[in-house]
Image (cartoon, rainbow, N blue to C red):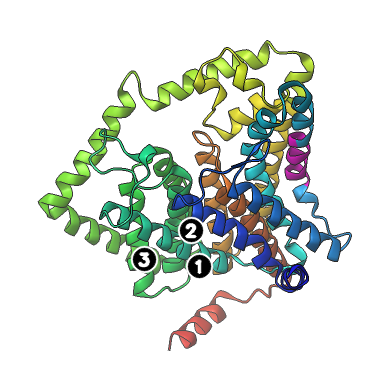
Amino acid sequence: MGALLFVVVWRWPLWGVLAPLCVASLLDLLQIGSGGVDVGVSLYIDDIACVVSLGVGILVYLRYWGCFPRDAVPCFALLILVAICFGRGLSTYGLKLAGNSVRDLFSFAAPALAVMLLRPALRLDASRLARWLVGAGLCLSAIAMLRWAGVLPTPVELEDNLRVVSRTLGADYAMIIGHAFIAAIYLAFAERGNRWRRVGAGLLGLVTFGLQHRSVWAGTAAGIAWLTLRSGRIVNARRLAYGAVCCAVAGTVMFAIPQVSDGAVALISSNVEETQAENSTWAWRVSGYEEAAARIISSEPVDLLIGSPAGWADGAIASFASTHIHSRYVDTLAYYGMVGFMALLMWLWILARTVRGPMRRLHGKTLDNRAPAVFLEALLLSEAVYFVPYTGGILNGVLLGLIWLAAIESNKECVTMRFEPRAVQDIREWISAR
């Protein structure tokens, strides 16, 4: 059995990396096996999936020895910091506390590194990534709607009486639907999509709105705004105008129905009121950020540099908001010091530079080939905004790795691209349309 599994992973490494992570996310979403197993440290399905995927990624690296991507060095550095902090905390706080403390960053960085190590064995372009995202978004939307309909049970932690429409998915899953919304818009208007793609885009937009995660709204809005503004010089003006008219007509028809308009207004009003309340979740988070920052400044030089030993937060005299930090940036700084924070920023900067590569090569060219780069930029910006109020998890780490792979492929296409006069391109488009 082990030999067969090794052969399958060797032949199809993509499935070896993505399949465990997707299965783990699905089981977590459906609350199956969420209790974990105590083996000295709490062991969850997510942990096993991350270890398996990272092992497959290392296997691909060994198969193509010498092909370790330099762009993955900051991500690898974060995992090294995880190991260092775990080792420092192991003797002081014990296996359980130290292991539980490093799980958050490990489950974010390990899937990303595993995906990035697939570079020699996988070619992924922006369109393929967009289709994957739309498929994942539609599956998650189906689960959300089944929970709204009462067919599937909603997890207890998501139930509250503050909202007109209850949240049925956690923020990480809702953010994937937001990314899928951006991807559907890209496919519908930048690649001559059919009407079903536009219907899918509308459905994803409605579900993103109905899930009521304000951080997801902000991240998705930032990505869509970037995609729209940067696409003006790239995508055919007729396509953009047609898309704008469709959105305007759909919005007018929907808000003309009293039940829909009243529900939308009530939903927005409840979220605005919650944001303005003195005990809002954002005020709670900002208070935690301030407390964590003050603690970092007053810490020992070694802790300020690479973070405190893993497990320190369990017995610390501090508020819950300052130890369970809902921000990838602040969390990394608080737990892994300046080195971890700079490694995270360097990783995101390298991703931005890689995604920006095709745009630099195609500067001054009015080609639709620039659209994939704009789409990848929109996805990365959406993720960066989302990391302000949330840390992200397995799916977010996977997406960062896939964005990098798609950007690398776009760079290769730009190097070998033959530029034709605009008139020749218009003739080709006219012939293909016929």
Element carrying mark 1: helix
Residue at mark 2: 231
Q: Earlier in the sequence, mark 1 or mark 3?
A: 1
**Camera-side residue: 58 or 365?**
58
Q: Do the residues labelled 2 and 3 touch (CB within 8 Å)?
A: no
**Camera-side residue: 200 or 170?**
170
**Camera-side residue: 343 or 191?**
343
Name the spot of residue 276 as percent of width and height, x first: 31, 24
Q: In this view, does 133 lie above or below 30?
A: below
Which residue does the image show at 75% across and 29% down from the upper left?
85
Name the spot of residue 273 as percent of width and height, x first: 26, 28
Residue at mark 3: 200
- For residue 259, which numbered disc appears in the image? none
Q: Which of marks 2 and 3 is nearer the N terminus?
A: 3
Q: Main secondary structure of the magenta part?
A: helix
Q: Can residue 366 be seen in this view?
A: no
Q: Can residue 315 be seen in this view?
A: yes
Q: Do the residues labelled 1 and 2 touch (CB within 8 Å)?
A: no
Name the spot of residue 349 as percent of width and height, x first: 67, 42
Q: Name the residue type under label 3.
A: Gly
Element carrying mark 2: helix
Residue at mark 1: 131
Which quadrant: the N terminus? bottom right
Which quadrant: the C terminus? bottom left
Chain part drawn in magenta? 73-82
Q: Earlier in the sequence, mark 1 or mark 2?
A: 1
